[in-house]
């Protein structure tokens, strides 16, 4: 097993002992200053923006996002890769479904583009090994020296994911563009001990298990890449006979994972999370990331568009890393409505919509709810045909009650037939499709 991988595995699994939250934060501060000293020597983008600042003033650096990163890609990365050549390699891999080519040993990949435009990410060989050691420590059930069969479903494979395939660990990538029937047959033969997939895929596999065509019992099931809706979580755990764990991973890094108690903790051993709290929403924030290990494509004060909710009570596991109640979804999917009191626009967070729909009826198997404008909401429910009209009216009343509690103008609520979307598109049960 490579030295870097083993070092990061051992550190993550056994070396992290911070007596208090304050000790963790002080350790983070030392790490980010050490990291910035190296980054500033290699990237013109951050060097120019840090002029006149001391290392301890790093929180005064400008906040960036995906658009800024792509606009300044050539001057931001530290290995001299141009955006044009990176895009060419990434698009060729997407078309051929061969994700092994690199640029000078650097892995190139594309983000899914759910925020409106696709981003390019770069990862060096050393960073791959560090990532593999960390994720093995946080996700693998048991020792890395026992035999594991990992089944990994994503829209695109990567050398990054293949770096986990070491020693007794077998790793098989399942292309989400392939038919579900092909996956079921392969899984019955492979019999994975660890199943990693987006909730939309886990839902389909659960249905296959319900029908009796899928026969497997992995030791651990991990949800990735999409928001895990409570409705899907319950259905999947019942059909696949196991608690669903989560990994919070995106183009910008490995951001969180569930502990043995099933609580999602942020990876503050890798990343500093500044919090942009949302007005009028208790414990909800948008994270601003500073990754103090990523060097090839530095992530310094990078604003995501995710909404996270802090856990109210400490996790029983005793970790000093911040515990989350949930990943709420994207800030792009916050609904906006008009107040009856003053006519001002106010936000309605996805969790409120989710809870209203799920509380309306226990007969709802799946759903989709889209806000097309401040006054128009479209719902689709998957229920037994004979219950469709009843459930639609129950959902209508639940949403109108929510709007009433918020003292906002009632929307026009329309219903359409439920149709499951393509696996090429991320599952979003609560979605906004207009710009406020």
Image (cartoon, rainbow, N blue to C red):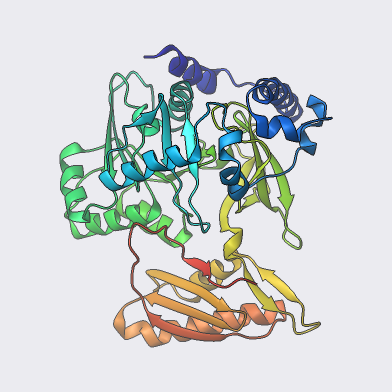
**Residue 225 in picture, x, y percent from top left:** 45, 48
Say which of 291 and 270 sits in front.
291
Q: Quadrant of the N terminus?
A: top left
Give the vertical position of 210 relative to 401 (above or below): above
Horizontal side of 237 relative to 329 (left or right) equals left
Quadrant hosting residue 307: bottom right
Residue 397 in sight here: yes
Quadrant placement of the C terminus: bottom right
Q: Residue at x 63, y 77 (%)?
A: 402
The residue drawn where x is 65% and y is 25% is 39
- Return the x and y of residue 275 as percentages of the image width and height: 71, 46
Q: Residue at x 58, y 48 (%)?
A: 66
Q: Position of residue 306 (x, y in %)?
A: 59, 53
- Looking at the image, residue 269 sits to the left or right of residue 220; the answer is right
Quadrant in which residue 46 is drawn = top right
Give the camera-side residue of 172 and 229. 172
Q: Work out whether residue 197 or residue 34 is closer to the camera in this orientation and state it.
A: 34
- Residue sitting at x 46%, y 62%: 428
The number of discs equals 0
Image side of residue 430 versus residue 319, left or right: left
Q: Residue 373 in the image: x percent, y percent?
A: 58, 79
Q: State whether residue 153 appears in this view.
A: no
């Amino acid at each position: 097993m490579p030295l870097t991988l083993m070092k990061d595995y051992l550190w993550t699994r056994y070396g992290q002992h911070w007596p208090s939250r304050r000790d963790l934060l002080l350790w983070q501060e030392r790490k980010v200053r050490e990291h910035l000293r190296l980054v500033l020597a290699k990237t013109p983008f951050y060097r120019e923006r840090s002029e006149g600042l001391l290392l301890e003033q790093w929180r005064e650096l400008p906040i960036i996002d995906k658009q800024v990163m792509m606009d300044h890609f050539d001057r931001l990365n530290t290995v001299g890769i141009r955006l044009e050549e990176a895009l060419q390699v990434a698009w060729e891999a997407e078309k051929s479904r061969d994700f092994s080519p690199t640029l000078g040993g650097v892995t190139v990949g594309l983000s899914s583009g759910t925020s409106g435009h696709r981003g390019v990410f770069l990862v060096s060989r050393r960073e791959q090994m560090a990532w593999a050691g960390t994720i093995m420590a946080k996700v693998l059930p048991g020792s890395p020296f026992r035999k594991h069969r990992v089944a990994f479903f994503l829209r695109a494979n990567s050398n990054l994911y293949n770096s986990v395939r070491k020693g007794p660990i077998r790793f098989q990538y399942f292309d989400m563009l392939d038919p579900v029937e092909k996956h079921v047959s392969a899984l019955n033969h492979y019999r994975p001990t660890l199943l990693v997939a987006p909730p939309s895929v886990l839902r389909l596999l659960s249905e296959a298990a319900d029908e009796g065509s899928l026969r497997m019992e992995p030791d651990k099931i991990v949800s990735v890449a999409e928001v895990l809706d409570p409705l899907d979580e319950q259905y999947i755990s019942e059909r696949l006979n196991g608690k669903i764990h989560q990994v919070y991973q995106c183009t910008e890094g490995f951001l969180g994972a569930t502990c043995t108690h099933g609580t999602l903790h942020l990876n503050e051993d890798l990343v500093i999370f500044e919090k942009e709290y949302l007005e009028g929403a208790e414990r909800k924030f948008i994270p601003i990331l500073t990754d103090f290990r990523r060097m090839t494509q530095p992530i310094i004060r990078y604003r995501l568009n995710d909404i996270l909710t802090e856990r109210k009570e400490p996790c029983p596991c005793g970790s000093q890393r911040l515990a989350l109640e949930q990943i709420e979804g994207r800030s792009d999917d916050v609904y906006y409505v008009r107040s009856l009191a003053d006519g001002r626009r106010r936000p309605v967070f996805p969790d409120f919509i989710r809870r209203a729909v799920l509380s309306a009826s226990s007969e709802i198997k799946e759903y989709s709810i889209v806000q097309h404008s401040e006054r128009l909401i479209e719902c689709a429910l998957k229920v037994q045909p004979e219950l469709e009209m009843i459930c639609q009216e129950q959902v209508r009343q639940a949403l109108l009650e929510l709007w009433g509690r918020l003292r906002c103008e009632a929307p026009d609520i329309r219903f359409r037939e439920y149709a499951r979307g393509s696996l090429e598109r991320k599952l979003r049960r609560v979605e906004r499709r207009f710009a406020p």
